[in-house]
Amino acid sequence: MKKKILCTAALAAMISACAIPAPTAEAFSIGDIIGIAQGAAQYALLDKEFNYYNNTEEGRQELFKSYQEKLGVVHDEAKEAELSSIMSRLTASIGAEDPSIYDKPYLYFICADESFNAFCSMGHVMVVNDGLFKYLTNTDELAVVLGHEMGHGQKDHVVNAMHEKAKTELGAAVISGALGGSALSQEVLGIAVNQIETVQITRGNEKEADKLSFDYIYRAGYNPGAAAAVWQRVIEKGGDNDPTFAQEVFSPSDHPSNSERRDTYEKQLTELSKKHVTLKSNTNTVEVNGKEFVTPAPAGDMSAAERKYFVMGNLAAAYDHGENKNPAEARNGTVYLGSQAIITPADGDPSAEALAERLNQIK
């Protein structure tokens, strides 16, 4: 989910003054690097440059403004309010276990790109494509994507990958003296351009961010089923790892496939429910204690396959919170298990009363 073209801007900013002019007191020019480019000293300069953009408020703000200038900012009151609400809830969720997030709060904006993407760069700078709102019309699913990116941010996946790439590409040539002056400057720019396809998050990092996203959204009060649902939606719209659909959020071929990620989240839901909630094999039927509860109908722009995960998520949360000890009831057209809403029947679903009765029989 991440960097690609935008990592290009970030890396150029860190190593040369071409993309993001850095303050004299903190940033380092190519001439500085050439002057002491010997072994550990050269890497120390590079480390300090990365630290400036990743950890200092001045550097983070420069990087943030650079992205805004490069990509353009979408000012849409409704989208900005939704994004702000999600980020606030996720920040509180993360902060409950990792208060360091408040020392480096996320900087974020909506850019004009219409593709399905979001990414978190170094410095907790997050960019959300306007296209993400077009493809995801459910706030819980948006929270999954943003939680995934914040997982990358919390674990410094992006800055570490970019740093290692820069050391690999620049270190030997600079230390050996093979590059200097304007030649080195041009080489830096060339590496930056090529970063579009070469700086990637590892498979292990992607899995870690997926797991963190599940934890973040659940603690924030979102439906945990949204984690599986968003991948089901991606599969329906773009196939299982179609590289043209979600280039960065769902990226390279060595990463988990969309179906693998969906299925992993499905298993997490079953575990969250203490194994009370499952799916009937190869169907859209949600089961409770091995008995059929409901096969949701499509509703709105959500398929039956996507919608089943929201039902499964609500049931899993109910069991996790002990609400299953209370009777199921139909209230104002919605099925509740204790205080936990389970499903609001749509056209094609059984009535709330019929589902509540069924749930009481099998819960």
Image (cartoon, helix red, strand yellow):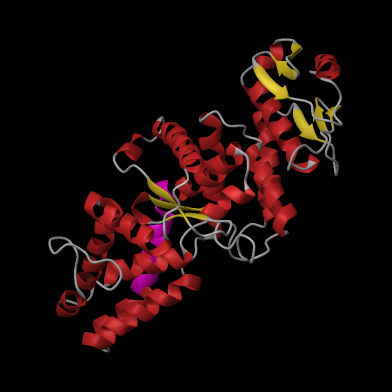
Locate residue 207, reporting x and y percent: 56, 51
Indicate whether 51 appears above or below 339.
Answer: below
Locate residue 340, reporting x and y percent: 65, 19
Residue 93: quarter of image: top left
Locate residue 77, reporting x and y percent: 46, 41
Q: Is residue 67 left or right of residue 22?
A: right
Residue at image location 24% in from the left, 57% down from the top: 52
Check if residue 251 falls in the magenta segment.
Answer: no
Residue 37: quarter of image: bottom left
**Magenta stretch, overall SS:** helix
Quadrant for the C terminus, please. Answer: top right
Is residue 332 in view from this perspective?
yes
Indicate whether 345 appears above or below 201.
Answer: above
Residue at image location 84% in from the left, 21% down from the top: 351
Check if residue 158 falls in the magenta segment.
Answer: yes
Q: Is residue 263 left or right of residue 142?
A: right
What stretch of residues is rendered in magenta? 153-167
Locate residue 256, reporting x and y percent: 63, 57
Is residue 177 in view from this perspective?
no
Q: Is residue 22 left or right of residue 4?
A: left
Residue 336: quarter of image: top right
In this orientation, which residue lies closer to the viewer: 276 or 224?
A: 224
Indicate whether 259 appears above or below 360.
Answer: below
Tally of numbered tags: 0
In this orientation, which residue lies closer to the viewer: 275 or 332?
A: 332
Residue at image location 58% in from the left, 63% down from the top: 247
